[in-house]
Amino acid sequence: MDFQYGWLLNLICYLPLAGAIFMMAFINKENSSGIKAFATAVAAIDFVISIPLWFLYRTDGAEFQFATQFDWIPSLGVQYIFGVDGFAVLLILLTTLLGLIAIYSSYTAITDRQKEYYIFLLLLQTGMLGVFCSLDFILFYVFWEVMLVPMYFLIGVWGGPRRLYAAIKFFLYTLVGSVLMLVGILTLYFYNAGGLAAIGLEGLGNPATFSVTQFYSIAPMIPAGVQFWVFLAFFVGFAIKVPMFPFHTWLPDAHVEAPTAGSVILAAVLLKMGTYGFVRLSLPILPDATVKAVGWIGALAMFAIVYGALVAMAQKDMKKLVAYSSVSHMGFVMLGMFALNAAGLRGSILQMLNHGVSTGALFLLVGIVYERRHNRMIAEYGGLAKVMPLYATYFMIITMSSIGLPTLNGFIGEFTILIGAFLHSWVWALVGASGIVLGAAYMLWLYQRVFFGELSNEKNKDLPDLNRREQWTLIPLVVVAFWIGLYPKPFFDRMAPTVDRVLERVAAAVPEFETAADHVAEIAHEPVPEAAGEHGE
Amino acid sequence: MSFYDLIWLVPVFPLIGAAFNGLVSNRLGLEKKVTHTVALIASGLAWLWGWAAVIQWYFTEDITKPYVVKAFTWISGGDLTIFGGRVVPLDISASFQLDALSATMLGFVTFVGFLIHLYSVGYMHSEPDRDYARYFSYLNLFMFAMLTLVTGSNLPVLFVGWEGVGLCSYLLIGFYFEKEWCAAAGMKAFIVNRIGDFGFLLAIFFAFFYFGTLEFDGLYQAMANDHNHVFAGAATIIGLLLFVGAMGKSAQLPLYVWLPDAMAGPTPVSALIHAATMVTAGVYMVARCNFFYQASPTAMLTVGVIGGVTAVFAATIGLVQNDIKKVLAYSTVSQLGYMFLAAGTGAYIAAIFHVVTHAFFKGCLFLGSGSVIHGCGGEQDIRKMGGLKKYMPTTFWTFLVATVAIAGIPPLAGFVSKDMILAKTFEAGMTNLNGYGTTYYFLWFLGLAGAAMTAFYMFRLVYLTFYGSFRGGEEAEHHVHESPWTMTLPLQILAGLSIVGGLILGFPGQLFHLDGWSFIDRFLAPVMLTHGEHGGHAVSLGLEWGLVFVSVAVALAGIFVAWRFYRNDPDFARPKALAERFPLVYKLLLNKYWVDEIYNATFVAGTIKLSRLLWEFDSRVVDGVVNGTALSTLGSSFISGVFDLKVVDGAVNLVAKSYDVASHRFRRLQVGFAQGYAMVMVFGAAMLLGIFYVIKL
Amino acid sequence: MISAEPYVALSLILFCLGLIGLMVRRNFITVLMSVELMFNAVNINLIAFSFRLGDLAGQVLAIFVITVAAAEAAIGLGLIIALVRLKDTVALDEADEMRG
Amino acid sequence: MTMTLDQFIPFLPEIFLATAGFVVLLLGVSMRRRGVRPLSLLGVAALAVTGLLVWLFARPVDGPVSILGDMLVVDSLAVFFKLLMLAAAAMAILLSAGYLERSGYGAGEYVSLILFATVGMFVMASGANLASLYVGLELMALSVYVLVGYFKLEVKSNEGAVKYFVLGAASSAVLLYGMSLIYGALGTLDLAAIRATLTAVPTSNSMLVLGMVLVGFGMLFKVAAVPFHVWTPDAYEGAPTPVTAFISVAPKAAAFAMFMRIFLGAFAPAVDQWRIIMWVAAAATLIYGNIAALTQNNVKRMLAYSSIAHAGYALMGIVAANAMGAWALLMYMVVYAFMNLGAFGFVILLESKGYAGEEIGDYAGLSRRHPAAALGMLIFMLALAGIPPTAGFMGKLYLFAAAVEGGYLVLTVIAVVMSAVSLYYYFRIVVQMYLRDGEEDGAAPAKLLRDRWTEVVIVVCVIATLVIGVFPAPLVGWAQSAASALGMM
Amino acid sequence: MDFLAANLEAIVFYTVAVLTVAGGIGVISFKNPVHSALALLGTFVMVAVLFILRHAEFLAAVQVLVYAGGIMVLYLFVIMLSRVKDLSVERVFLSSTAPLAILGGVLLGSLVAVGILLGTMATGDGGAAAMQAVDGVQVGNTEAVGWVLYTKYLIPFEVVSVVLLVAMIGAIVFARRDAVVADPGEGVQS
């Protein structure tokens, strides 16, 4: 670990919290403009000070940099460990950027109880950043749960008509997942230390600790049985967050009911916590179980890709549609991840960012028109391109990025993922690629129904086009979308060390682990004799 | 510092133009002059720079080798294990290459592209400023994508262009998006193309898996040195998958359906994208990847058969269409069929040759039709036209020339390239290529039939449009007028090329035993991994001439019929009679074999139905079941009744509800009076003791 | 000289009687009496054991039990009076405002 | 064997407290209605002094010492619990003052009863002999019966007392019966001796084990574990709210103290005999308590069920029966005391239409009218649900950890899932406070009373809840040293 | 005759035992609480006899004094006081649940019985002798008990005194018909 600039990481993580407390204490709840200005300022500063991470992170340096470490609860070996690798750096930047945008986008959308609203947004920020920073299981878990609370309120207080239901559903689902995860964590913890006497599980007798890196080091020694159960526990926790196929049902509700900023954060960052958890914890610590699970999770992911896309196609509510598209996109992420090869993992990590940018932007866009019409039904619209050309343009760009048009971010992610998936099994790539087709179908159909055709609905006749603020919420995302689409190399460079280490760990722990390139060969070789015969004559 | 070192500038110029028109001109609504000046300069520069680069390269470099310019590393996917356990890095660079093939494409794409920009200036002049800017930015953007496509040095970069042109065609088809059907057509085009791209992507993956590289040169070498056919199977798979992509882009069966609808776009767009350039991308790609097809008879045959069948199939539909652009559209499909037919016989050069000539005459035809439509104030139905030759002579002459060319009358461009294709096909039959001789004979026959029909429907078009008397009504007749020079100039240029282009580029030397007179043969040969492609004298001189004669005769026959039907009986009794004689056939053709309807009824409707179904499933069952499991973890099995109920009528609120039920059940224990509680305790205690004994004793 | 077993058996029977009485009677007073029965049962046990062991602890505990029983009786009867004042009944099962 | 006065020094706190009880009682008789605040202050002062005495005289200097004929033992565990009880009692008194004033019941008996109960709890916490433990238990129990029925003109209060009393009496009879059997089987009532015997001859003598089980039933009743929880909801709902707050914390802690002394201390060698009972009870308690709480609309009752549930969590520590389990339980007692007292503080303060804010609807829109109060309540609800960074999370974390270490994964899973469920009913209040406006449904919104003392208590609880949540280390350390007195592996 | 002499203790015990049980049954089955009270009285006395049989004379005395003397009178008072409406004329038993209750009681009882019967008791140097030695000196049971009570068991003893005090307070609190005027306006319902 490299402790240089450790303070910076802590500052980034806790600045929003400090801001929230300050706000709570010193800013009058009537002073709406002051509240907005302050919140935005805090988020902006947070973003600005997080930019140095991008430059200071050294790909050839220690695995975890900007680290902080000291005992927190010595009696239990709980430590306060902060530290990030390239992967986390990317996600942190994503978080700070979208946090800023989310706040900036809520100026006019939120008129009621603004003070609490921005306080919760800032708290949420800290929670999310904490998850990406912490390298101690308990610390990780604490942040993981802390972040639920503000999100609950964002949905529940400022959400739509069925907000209560959506909020509690969101909270319960994720909580169930995370508490099971806690059990898994404890099992690992005792396995590393004293063992679980009553079920006759010998421990390794190491000094008790929750430090993630310690578990990296013992990963190969963990017996398969233990790995299986712990993996299961983690899986439920993370899969619910992702969300993977059977656990996704909280997502549409949460998204639909949440206020725009809420949806943006939810889609852009919260979902990433699940995938982050997989990459950071499941894969390196439970390699054996991971390799065994590949088939199942791959199947689930493939199903999710197609399923999400198809269900999205049937939606009448824009936000629901985007929500289900998330299910599909996150399916890609999982697919790439569990291809367990460089391309797959890199793609999947990149796709996390892409999804954050594209879907975040989509929710912003939907929110913008919702703010004007207070209606999200696709049928209500049509021909908007006439009255809101600028809006239509942004929407088009983001649509293209989300359906993976080359030169935009989506393509890079999906392409890399699919190559990775292909090298695992051609079937994966086949299904995945079909997801791309469907993606185009539902997004373009949405675009078609909303922007093209007659401007039939009277209410839409004089909708104002984007104002300057709304544009500024979108421009950064568009820029990033093009950046990743055209020159993703810096991103790949930063995530490369993480990916390599993960793969090394899996390979080190599971000798018979192979990237399954062979069965592609088999299927592809059937025609060989016949073809050769042809050439023979 | 040379032009071809900066080859990547060729796509970049139009990109800049697009950016300007899109971001500045469109936003600020600058006046048209500015807009089209910028657009013209952009595409013009691309043209000049492109030609300069090609010429300079031709004279300074070794043209048998591709000249690759790497701009930057694009995608880096880390080290991967591929076929045979090799470990290679996935490093895809944004790099461009110049070789005979891309030079050829570059040459005519930039040129035709510029002409059509010029043409558009006149054609679109009545659009509002902003839309005008939007149009030109799209057009420039298209140029960028198309040029990337033809200059890209590896599959992914080609794919970028590939998708780029797809996007532009989507945008341009849907240019008049207020019209529901225009937008719909655009979407259709994009999605059908996506289906093709699906194959393309998989092809790329297979290619990487087997060869560890995606650079064309690398692949070429790998296949060239694959002497003991290790990669034969791979070649088949990749070839077929690539061809799936080509089907989409180049509108072959069964994915051709989008092209006719694509005519919804402005006519210059139809000319540029849907006739001259984009749709030929498929052919280009197949030719580019010829090394795969050479190694795989299966793939080759497939290409040939699909091509041939499409050629005839589309032609038959073209016979009876009444929308001038629809006719041309189907003719395009059919011509593309010819190109693939050529590729299918291994005559990639012929295919590319036909691409070029087709760009000339079909571009000319489309622009001509545009001019006609423009002249008739937007009318597209040929039944409402007629006798236009006296109103718009230039258009008429150019149109006629192009028609003759496409009909395959020597020595026009159309004849040269199409005859080359037919000859190669016949030759393939004779040499029993890959042991599929009979099939190739059959394909040759199809080709002939197609030629005849082509001649027929093209002349039908000409007669109905320009001869006879105007059928569009009195006051419409007054408005008919010739188009401005910006429109006619391109027409004339293209018409000229349709006449001489063929002979200049590919003088049919084989007819006179003069090898190497065909420039394009010599020029393109190094790109092709072909064995005995040119100069092969499988066919004797006599037979060569015989073939020529046959095809010409067939074409003339077609023309004659058209003349009988639509020229020398003014009220078209004969065709009507024919239609009544075979009503079914007529209906079938008129309704394009109901393919669209079938597709809509099956695939489209099917998908949507499925999606609806899954949505139901999701909102009811999945939610229900997941919540169900969530609660069954509570071990409260007794609420299962409620659970079923909920799943059935799909209350999403299951968790809370069933908790409620559980909760109420539990609360019943709290009976309310002390003795009751005492009993609960006693029985509880008894139960605990019972458990205890069961376990302990 | 008989051993402790019969005493224990007796006490168990008495204990159960008390328990049953507690559960079946409506009258608060009788319920209290049943409780007293249970305490007595305990005492029988204690005495029997203490004799068998030759140890006084049992007896001492028994004294405490008696005392506590007395105390509980006092409070119980107080409650009865309060109950009677409030609801004008000594029926225990009529105190059932709260349930669920 | 003779007694010398100096032997009584460690017993000073109890003596002082009892005397204080007397004094308060007598003063109470003289000054009826007016005397609430002074008497309460007096009581608190007495408790404070007692705390001081405990610290001065009843603290083990080197290792545990048993005093006065091995009836009591002075060890760190006792100290831990005594201080906790003192704190709880003091806070309960502070919570009561305003409430009593409004109700018009005299404070004399009230305060003195709390003090006497505390004495009883002291004995339970430090008892070294079944006899002393029993009398301590009864002292506490009787006082609490009276406290529950203290508002004798309130039907509910009386009813609660009646039920609690009848069932309590029966259960203590069961407890005694168990003790008698143990006495019969081992011939001693002395915990240390019992432990020694069990260690010497590891027996599965069923009469002995049965004795343990019956004693266990008695204890389970006192900690309100299923199936012996039945008295809890009614007693809690019926009792005057401050009393509810008090009995949900202090007697429960005392009961667990006794529980630990007997089962983790004396019966520890025979753990495999009785563990299964505890396991089942714990599981049942977790499930029942949490689920039954879901649909309660009366906040007091809901908190009653929640306290049943929390007993379940605590029982995990007993089931685990390992060192961690022991100190995790201790820690949890402290955490629970703070968060629960805090929550009840709000129930007391919240008054609607002249009644205590018991109905869940009374909390509607609280966040608009009293943001600070709502925030406080939110923190307590989060803590009770075990969401970090509150003390509640830390408490649960260690208990779960202990259970996992013991290998009771199934139990742990039940517990974690249930703690997720519990969130649902705690958040019903949060929903009312934040997600509803009291205005919308016309009903006159409950108003928040001003009462310095109560507010002080609440603030203390909030601070404690958060501080323990973020820096649990010191408390953990203390709990560990306290639990070490049990001499567990 | 000598049979009698030989088994006197047994005969006495079983007679007394039967009477005790009979009394118990009487307590829980008589309709009229007064009768129950009298039955209870009988039981108490019988139990006292059992104590004597087990050489716990002091305890027997306490039993008679405290129970038969004190508590019983208390009961009778309360019965008189609470003659608000005589339950004996209406339902005495929770007839609806009674069978279940009896079943439960018996069930629990038998389960316990099983445990006891299978179990073994500790044995000491039984008989009265050992119980009545204080520092080796033989004394009367009363003195012995007193001695232990005031030395070893002093603390519980004192605590019990406090218990009695609390009981007193409780009785007063509940039974006092005092002027706790909770005027309806501010009466806090808890």
Image (spheres, coloured by chain):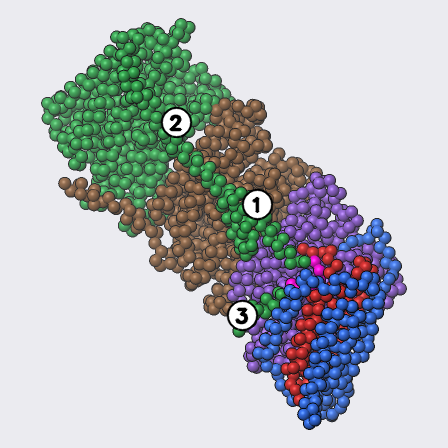
Please state the horizontal and vertical placement of residue B20, each as a whole percent of the image: 45, 25
Q: Of circles 3 and 1, which is in front?
A: 3
Who comes first in sequence, dot 3 or dot 2? Answer: 2
Please state the horizontal and vertical placement of residue B559, each as a whole percent of the image: 23, 14
Which quarter of the picture shows residue B258? top left
Identify the hue of chain A.
brown
**Label 3 with label 2: CB-CB less than 8 Å:** no
For the C terminus of chain C, give its image quadrant.
bottom right
**Which chain gets the green colouring?**
B
Q: Of circles 3 and 2, which is in front?
A: 3
- Vertical placement of residue B436 versus C79, above or below: above
- Residue extending furthest toward the bottom: E2
Identify the hue of chain E.
blue
Return the chain for callout 1: B
Q: Which residue is depicted at the point 19% across and 45% down?
A: B228
Identify the hue of chain D.
purple
Please state the horizontal and vertical placement of residue B563, each as a whole percent of the image: 25, 11
Please state the horizontal and vertical placement of residue A293, each as a whole percent of the image: 41, 54
Disc 3 residue type (three-letter): Val
Magenta region: B672-680
Any part of residue B54 in sight = no
Question: Circle 1 is placed at which residue position?
Answer: B653
- Is residue B677 inside the magenta stretch? yes
Question: Circle 3 is placed at which residue position?
Answer: B694
Q: Distance of mark 3 from mark 1, alpha carbons? A: 40 Å
* Mark 2 surroundings: few (<14), some (14-19) or many (≥20) residues within 10 A: many
Q: Which residue is depicted at the point 80% across and 58% down?
A: C87
Nearer the observer, E40 or A307: E40
Identify the hue of chain C.
red
